[in-house]
Image: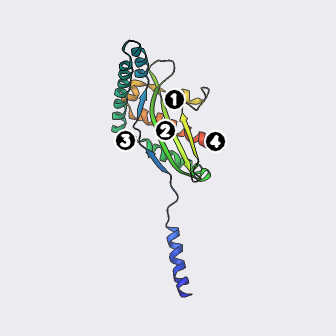
Amino acid sequence: MLRIVFLLPLLLFACAQQPASTVNILSESPLQFSGKGAGAGMMLSSAMGPMGIAIGFAIDEGIAKDIRATALKGNVVVEEILQKELKKKPSIVSNKAITSINIDRHGFITWPGGDDLVMSQFHITINDNEKNSLIIKFPEDFSSSEAFLDEAETLSDIKQDSDKIRALLTYAVSATLDRLIANPQ
């Protein structure tokens, strides 16, 4: 009986020191860009075949490298943005029993209609403790009438301004998490 009395406070203290459950955030994909090169690649493929498509991908990768360099200088890290946004919406983790979030793709795509505007892109897979998965793709899973269409910047600004990179990615992450709240699954 004496052992139980001695061990009980020790166990209670140990349990009180356990951190709250956290979400494992995984990202193996670098910041990406899709737009100008994809269109050029399709046009070049008619004259050059597969080499034209490869040139198109190289154009987009060159633009992505410029954006990644600016993001790096400004310390823009998408995993940190996601963690910060999750802290603003703590009910997501507890209500959905989320165990991990995989960032499948993040970056920028050209704005439909031209004008050298780009918008953010954010694709995630959410896993819960019952081994269920939910995939949300921003902006592809959102209707064109939603307010995110107001969130765009010029490509030249995104290539040079880390604050604008952070703002657009934060908007995409927040909108994606809002979609998760609204999802009954």
Of marks 3 and 4, which one's residue comes earlier in the chain?
A: 3
Image quarter in which the C terminus is found? top right
The CA distance from mark 4 to mark 2 is 20 Å
Which comes before the other along the chain, label 4 or label 2? 2
- Residue for point 52% across, 80% down: 7
Front disc: 4 or 2: 4
Q: From the image, tell me which residue sits under label 2.
A: 170
Instruction: Give the CA distance from mark 3 to mark 1.
Output: 21 Å
Residue drawn at x 35%, y 34% is 70
Mark-to-mark CA distance, 1 and 4: 23 Å
Q: Residue furthest right?
A: 184
CA gap between label 2 and label 1 equals 11 Å
- Please rate how many residues cluster around mark 2, counting C-alpha atoms within 10 Å: few if below 14, some from 14 to 19, many from 20: many
The residue that label 3 is drawn on is 75
Mark 3 in CB contact with mark 1 (< 8 angstroms) = no
Q: Which residue type does callout 2 highlight?
A: Thr
Label tally? 4
At label 1, the amino acid type is: Glu
116 or 127: nearer the eye?
127
In the image, which disc is placed on residue 183? Answer: 4
Identify the residue at image location x=47%, y=33%: 168
User: Does label 1 or label 4 sit earlier along the sequence?
Assistant: 1
Mark earlier in primary sequence (2, 3): 3
* Quarter of the image where one finds residue 107: top left
Left or right: where does residue 113 sit relative to residue 43? Answer: right
* Mark 2 and mark 3: Cα distance apart in space: 13 Å
Q: Which residue is mark 1?
A: 151
Direction from residue 109 to residue 72 in the image, left or right:
left
45 to 13, vertically: above or below: above
N-terminal label among 3 and 1: 3
Amino acid at pointer 3 = Asn
